[in-house]
Image (cartoon, grey):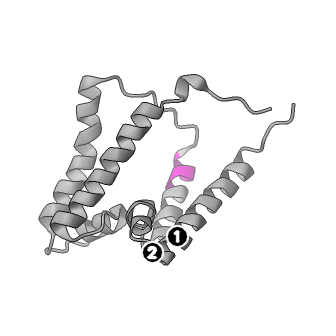
């Protein structure tokens, strides 16, 4: 039998977060003509690409500073990492490789691509979601009652 952790059910903060992500993506494309694909933004900063370095740096800085500002106003949730460093490194590398093969990440495809009705983004997002579900089911099998 499955149960819901009602204490962790936070629809209002999820809605506000989703609206802020959507607004940031919309503002970036309206004012800069660029898609808010985080993996692409980060890759170009790491590569040292000079064109657009300023807006990319500010965008990434905003992603780092935002939770710090939030933490000044409200308590941050407790984070519990249950995997060791080797698992986290392997998972990070697999996600990085996957974003290169998919020509983008969940933010680029799922937020921006779907809003532009991109078929490639639909397929990429479905692949992300199905892979995530399969991973959870394999690593955390449902407990029988």
Q: Percent x, y for residue 12?
A: 42, 32
Are there few (<14), some (14-19), or many (20+) residues within 10 Å of tag 1?
some
The one nearer the camera, 6 or 140, is 6
Are there few (<14), some (14-19), or many (20+) residues within 10 Å of tag 2?
some
- Is residue 135 one of those drawn in magenta? no
Look at the image and tell me whether residue 130 can be seen.
yes
The reply to whether discs 2 and 1 touch (Cβ–Cβ < 8 Å) is: yes
Left or right: 63, with 17 as reference point: left
SS for tag 1? Answer: helix
Give the residue number, with chain letter if any, for mark 1.
122
Chief SS of the magenta region: helix
Residue 49 is drawn in which quadrant?
A: bottom left
Residue 142 is drawn in which quadrant?
A: top right
Residue 138 numbered tag: none
Give the residue number, with chain letter if any, for mark 2.
118
Look at the image and tell me whether residue 102 can be seen.
no
Q: Percent x, y for residue 104?
A: 42, 70
SS for tag 2? Answer: loop
Say how many tags the image has: 2
Q: Percent x, y for residue 44?
A: 26, 71
The one nearer the camera, 70 or 96, is 70
Left or right: 11, with 135 as reference point: left
The region drawn magenta spans 85-89
Q: Percent x, y for residue 118?
A: 45, 75
Q: CA distance from mark 2 to mark 1?
A: 6 Å
Residue 41 is drawn in which quadrant?
A: bottom left
């Amino acid at each position: 039998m499955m149960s819901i952790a009602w204490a962790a059910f936070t629809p209002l903060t999820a809605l506000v977060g989703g609206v802020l992500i959507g607004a940031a993506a919309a503002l970036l494309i309206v004012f800069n003509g660029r898609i808010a694909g985080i993996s692409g933004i980060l890759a170009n900063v790491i590569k040292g690409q000079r064109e657009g370095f300023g807006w990319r740096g500010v965008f990434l800085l905003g992603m780092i500073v935002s939770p710090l500002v939030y933490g000044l106003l409200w308590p941050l949730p407790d984070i519990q990492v249950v995997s060791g460093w080797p698992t986290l490194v392997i998972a990070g590398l697999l996600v990085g490789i996957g974003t290169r093969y998919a020509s983008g990440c969940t933010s680029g495809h799922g937020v921006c691509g779907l809003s532009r009705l991109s078929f490639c983004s639909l397929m990429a997002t479905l692949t992300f979601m199905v892979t995530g579900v399969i991973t959870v089911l394999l690593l955390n099998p449902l407990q029988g009652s």
